[in-house]
Amino acid sequence: MKIGDKFSGKVSGIQPYGVFISLADGEQGLIHISELKNGYVSDIENEYKIGQELTVVVLDIDEYDNNVSLSLRALQDKKIGRPILHKHFWTNYKDQIGYESIKEIKPKWIADAMHQIEGK
């Protein structure tokens, strides 16, 4: 087994922090709650059941104690949330004013900054 390997395993335990998976070679790996899926995991015990078959990928193998970190999230699409239906602008893009408003206020900003610098 090496990092990046994909395989199927059965859920052997469920804890508030993640799901344990029985590996083919008799070892156990952990899917941390942050690696279960994209987004928030509301109720881990209702979403996963002991004996459930899952396809996982190896994220890391600890060289000292041979703990295996697994992930389901790495196999999922990266898309989360709702699709963007229209683009939001933080300015009124229809005015077509570009840099003009900043150009008008810039001398005042410089004067204020210089006044603060010289005053201290």
Image (cartoon, grey):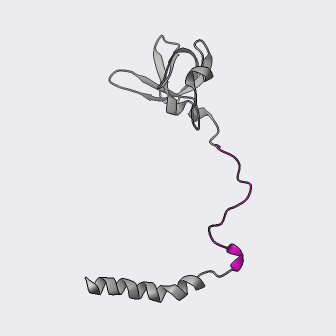
Query: Which residues are the magenta region?
Result: 81-95
Label the magenta part by its dominant secondary structure: loop
Q: Visible in this render: residue 1? A: no
Where is residue 113 shown, x and y percent of the image? 37, 83
Q: Is residue 87 left or right of residue 10?
A: right
Q: Which residue sits furthest right?
A: 85
In the image, is residue 27 above or below residue 115?
above
83 is within the stretch colored magenta = yes
Q: Visible in this render: residue 111? A: yes
In the image, is residue 20 above or below residue 75?
above
Number of numbered discs on residues: 0
- Front residue of 2/70: it is 70
Q: Is residue 5 left or right of residue 114?
A: right
- The residue positioned 30% from the left and 83% from the top of the image is 117
Indicate the quadrant containing the C terminus: top left, top right, bottom left or bottom right: bottom left
In the image, is residue 108 above or below residue 69?
below
- The residue positioned 38% from the left and 21% from the top of the image is 66
Where is residue 111 shown, x and y percent of the image? 40, 88
- Front residue of 83/46: it is 46
In the image, is residue 33 above or below residue 52?
below
The picture quadrant where one finds residue 10 is top right
